Amino acid sequence: MSGRDPSSFQGSNLPVPYEVGYAKPPAEHRFAKGRSGNPRGRPKGAKNKPTGVNTDYGRKPTEDFLLMEAYRPVTIREGEQVIQLPAIQAVFRAMGVAAMKGNRLAQKTLAEMVERTEATHHQSKYELFSAMFDYKKDWSAEVECCEKLGLPDPQPIPHPDDLVLDFNTGDVKFLGPKTREEKQRLDGGLARRDQAQEEVNYFAEKYRRARSPKQRALYLSEWHWEQRMFDIVNYAVGKRYKAKLENRSYAEGASREGKALEELRTKRKLRSEYVE
């Protein structure tokens, strides 16, 4: 013991007295022997959950950790270049390099992995194509039957006319909505396009009848605005839903078919650069 005065110490009932300070409370504030520091106990349902991973019911934390490590970015050097790749891609790249250098185990493993991946991809593609072929055939027959009987189009989603099947490649393309939500957005867009067509007709007629240069400029500006709205919506929809604009203006500043969105972005960019 040092030569300190014992009166400078607190808690003389401890086996070894210590100086009061950080993490060394006075005797009256220390936990009494035999009494818990958490008298209420652990809250009901509390668990020692690991951080950074979802351990809720139905989850597989081990798989989450595995994927986190697989896609963790790592830095590697290739010749004079330093690049960053997901860890799993770096592993495959190292395996490919080893295979090209003659490592037979790497060659065999890599070839088998590629073969299995391609087989799985081919099987999934075949199953999708087969299912969509049957879907298109059945619904096309149903739509044709309704037309013959004078009944309204049943409007299945996706519509068979929006399905394009490539028998050479096995690819399936959707040129229209695939869900009810997408169909609602499409209907809203088509309604706005119809409104734009009505406005174009209205302002085109007003422009042709106006005599005042000020009025003609105002009507032409409104005409061009609605024409641009028509072109933007019309560009975004699938081929089956496209329409031809009546009363198209070819005056300076008018949007061009198929290029309205690009022109609008260019104008906004030039405007922001000018403001800056």
Image (tube, rainbow, N blue to C red):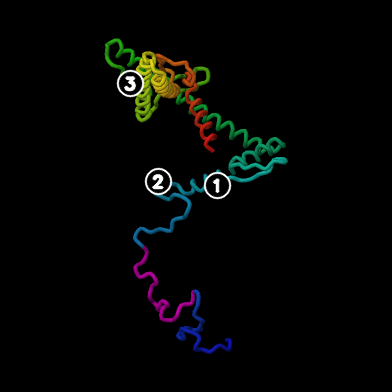
Q: In whole angstroms, how far apart are the C-alphas of marks 3 and 1? A: 46 Å
27 lies above or below 162: below
Q: What residue is disc 3 on? A: 155
Inspect the image, locate mark 2, and give the three-letter code of the amino acid beneath it: Gly
Quarter of the image with the N terminus is bottom right
- The span picked out in magenta is 23-42
Q: What residue is disc 1 on? A: 69
Which image quadrant for residue 198? Answer: top left
Mark 2 vs 1, N-terminal side: 2
Task: Determine if the magenta segment contains residue 56.
Answer: no
Q: Is residue 86 visible?
A: yes
Q: In whole angstroms, how far apart are the C-alphas of marks 2 and 1? A: 21 Å
User: Residue 208 location, x and y as percent?
Assistant: 39, 13
Q: What residue is disc 2 on? A: 58
144 lies above or below 86: above
Q: In whole angstroms, how far apart are the C-alphas of marks 3 and 2? A: 37 Å
Q: Secondary structure at mark 1?
A: helix
Inspect the image, locate mark 3, and give the three-letter code of the amino acid beneath it: Gln
